[in-house]
Image (cartoon, grey):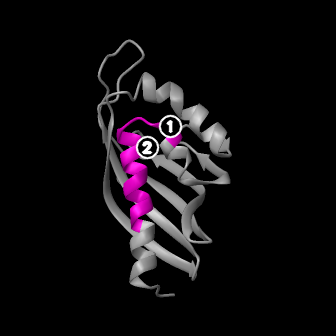
Amino acid sequence: MNQTTSNTTAVQHIIEHLAGAWNNHNEDDLAQLFREDGEFTDVAGQLMRGRAEIARMHHQPFTTTQKHAILTIKDIRITWITATCASVDVHWNTTGHQTLTEQPLPARNGLMTLIVVQEEERWLIAVGHSFDFTATYRRSDP
């Protein structure tokens, strides 16, 4: 299904705001991009239900292991499900991670899959899953 340029732009802006909130290490701004009852599963498989829990679960990493980390969006692919619902694949890269003892960690890459919906005049993330491909097997591995 094709969608209007304005709706596509609105969805792209959500991804820009998500990267901005992540790079500013602002868990409250990040959580506001989700529906009140939105869900997010992080790269460690932790399920967060609702804005409050999404904010709470991002506070610790944003103030420790990710406090210097930067998220870069590499590619966005939007697939329209209906006129007010889209599946969004976001290929990402992060740098600046560290251990709890502030030892640097290598860059990471992965994929975030988001279901984005329009509620009244606002676009919000209903469900999101993030996958880190950094430590997974390569295509050449058996």
Q: Nearer the viewer, mark 2 or mark 1?
A: 1
- Given the image, on which type of amino acid does mark 2 rest? Thr
The residue nearer to you, when weighing 41 against 50, is 50
Vertically, is 39 above or below 126?
above
The stretch drawn in magenta includes residue 24: yes
Query: Which residue is under mark 1?
Result: 27
User: Is residue 112 magenta-colored?
Assistant: no
Whole-percent x, y for residue 11 in the image: 45, 68
At numbered mark 2, what does the secondary structure look like: helix, strand or loop? loop
Q: Residue at x 46, y 87 (%)?
A: 2
* Corner quadrant of residue 97: top left
**Residue at x 56%, y 61% (from the top left corner):** 124
In the rendered image, which residue does mark 2 sit on?
Answer: 136
Q: Say few, some or many: other residues with alpha carbon within 10 Å of mark 1 (under 14 / 14 to 19 / 20 or more).
A: many
Looking at the image, residue 71 lies above or below residue 104? below
Q: Position of residue 52 (x, y in %)?
A: 65, 39
Of mark 2 and mark 1, the one earlier in the sequence is 1
Evaluate whether residue 47 shows in this view.
no
Position above or below: 87 against 14: below
Q: Is residue 93 above or below residue 58?
A: below
Q: Position of residue 61 (x, y in %)?
A: 47, 28
Asked if residue 129 lies left or right of residue 12, the reply is right
In x, y percent, where is residue 129?
56, 52
Q: Residue 49: in sight, yes or no? A: yes
Instruction: Please provide the residue range marked out in magenta.
Output: 12-28
Query: Callout 2: few (<14), some (14-19), or many (20+) C-alpha neighbours within 10 Å?
Result: few
Distance between the Cα atoms at labels 2 and 1? Answer: 27 Å
Q: Nearer the viewer, residue 4 or 90?
A: 4
Please tell me which residue lies in front, 12 or 77.
12
